[in-house]
């Protein structure tokens, strides 16, 4: 790999961290980045719908935590928001687009304006860290040339180095992904999600697979990157402290329905525990 790219990224370095990392003054007014209305999803193997008329709205720059017990429909809702899972009913407007009306390249372009951080890091173990981050730009162009750093355009490699710098891992750019620790892997996954310069980021229990101490460190970094970039965030979590600390608003699902939607500052742990009762 070009050492000048690494040096340039390292000079920029990772961002500092907020002392608290929690909710700020709130998002600006304006049309929502995500507007979901009446979403229903039934996989046909249960007595009730996984999602039963769910409606939520996320404003530009807002961070929303989605909580609820296992089977409440949190992960399914995230995937319906991108049509990775096709809703049976309802409407999804993503960054001003009617997502359910889109097909083919138009749908791919709409998705390219978002990032997704999964619970399982989903890195390609045999490839380098840099190549994995470059994969975050596959939807933006150059196709197969973005699969490996050796063939990627210089602009793509420079952007990937910048993203690695933001998570503090430029020094691991050439390491195989299967030689990373769990915390390092998820930081690479975050860098990959930022690669395409998204406006909105989805995260499905982003630190659930990590030890508590490392998970707190990674979540704090992740929240700081989202805040400092002015991005919109919808994330699921079973960790109630994270739901309160790193969001502007908490939405709770239970049995496929919204049972709580309130500003984080107005919600206490007792309110959240009641969702699981």
Image (cartoon, rainbow, N blue to C red):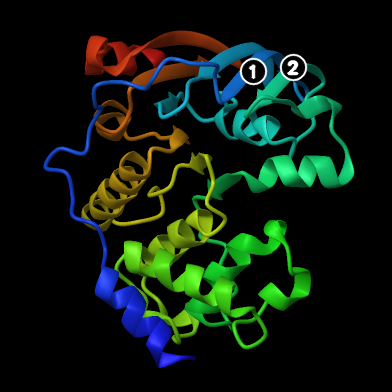
In the rendered image, the vertical position of residue 185 relative to residue 55, given as above or below: below
Residue at 58% across, 71% down: 156
* Residue that appears at 41% across and 29% down: 61
For the C terminus, the image quarter is top left
Depth order, front residue of 259/172: 172
Quarter of image, res 83: top right
Residue 135: horizontal and vertical position, in percent?
Answer: 62, 67
Q: Is residue 75 left or right of residue 12?
A: right
Give the residue at the far left of this rendering: 19
Q: Earlier in the sequence, mark 1 or mark 2?
A: 1
Residue closer to the observer: 89 or 229: 229
The residue under label 1 is: 36
> Considering only vertical position in the picture, is 69 above or below 196?
above
Q: Secondary structure at mark 2?
A: strand
Q: Who's the residue at 32% across and 17% down the image?
A: 272
Q: How many marks?
A: 2
> Residue 18, image x and y in percent?
17, 44
Q: On residue 91, which mark appears?
A: 2
């Amino acid at each position: 790999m070009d050492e000048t790219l690494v040096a340039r990224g390292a000079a920029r370095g990772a961002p500092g961290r907020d002392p608290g990392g929690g909710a700020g003054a709130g998002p600006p007014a304006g049309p929502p980045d995500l507007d979901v209305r009446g979403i229903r999803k039934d996989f046909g193997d249960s007595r009730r719908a996984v999602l039963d008329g769910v409606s939520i709205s996320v404003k530009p720059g807002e961070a929303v935590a989605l909580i609820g017990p296992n089977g409440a429909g949190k992960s399914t809702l995230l995937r319906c928001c991108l049509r990775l899972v096709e809703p049976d009913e309802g409407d999804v407007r993503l960054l001003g687009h009617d997502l359910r009306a889109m097909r083919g390249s138009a749908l791919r372009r709409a998705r390219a304006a978002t990032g997704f951080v999964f619970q399982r890091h989903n890195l390609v173990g045999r490839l380098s860290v840099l190549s994995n981050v470059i994969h975050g730009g596959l939807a933006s162009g150059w196709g197969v040339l973005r699969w490996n750093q050796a063939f990627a355009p210089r602009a793509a490699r420079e952007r990937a180095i910048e993203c690695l710098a933001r998570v503090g891992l430029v020094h691991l750019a050439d390491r195989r992904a299967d030689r990373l620790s769990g915390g390092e892997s998820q930081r690479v996954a975050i860098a990959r999600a930022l690669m395409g310069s998204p406006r909105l980021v989805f995260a499905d229990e982003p630190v659930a697979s990590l030890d508590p101490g490392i998970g707190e460190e990674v979540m704090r970094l992740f929240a700081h990157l989202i805040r400092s970039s002015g991005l919109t965030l919808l994330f699921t979590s079973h960790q109630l402290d994270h739901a309160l600390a790193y969001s502007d608003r908490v939405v709770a699902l239970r049995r496929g329905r919204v049972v709580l939607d309130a500003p984080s500052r107005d919600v206490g742990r007792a309110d959240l525990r009641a969702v699981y009762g």
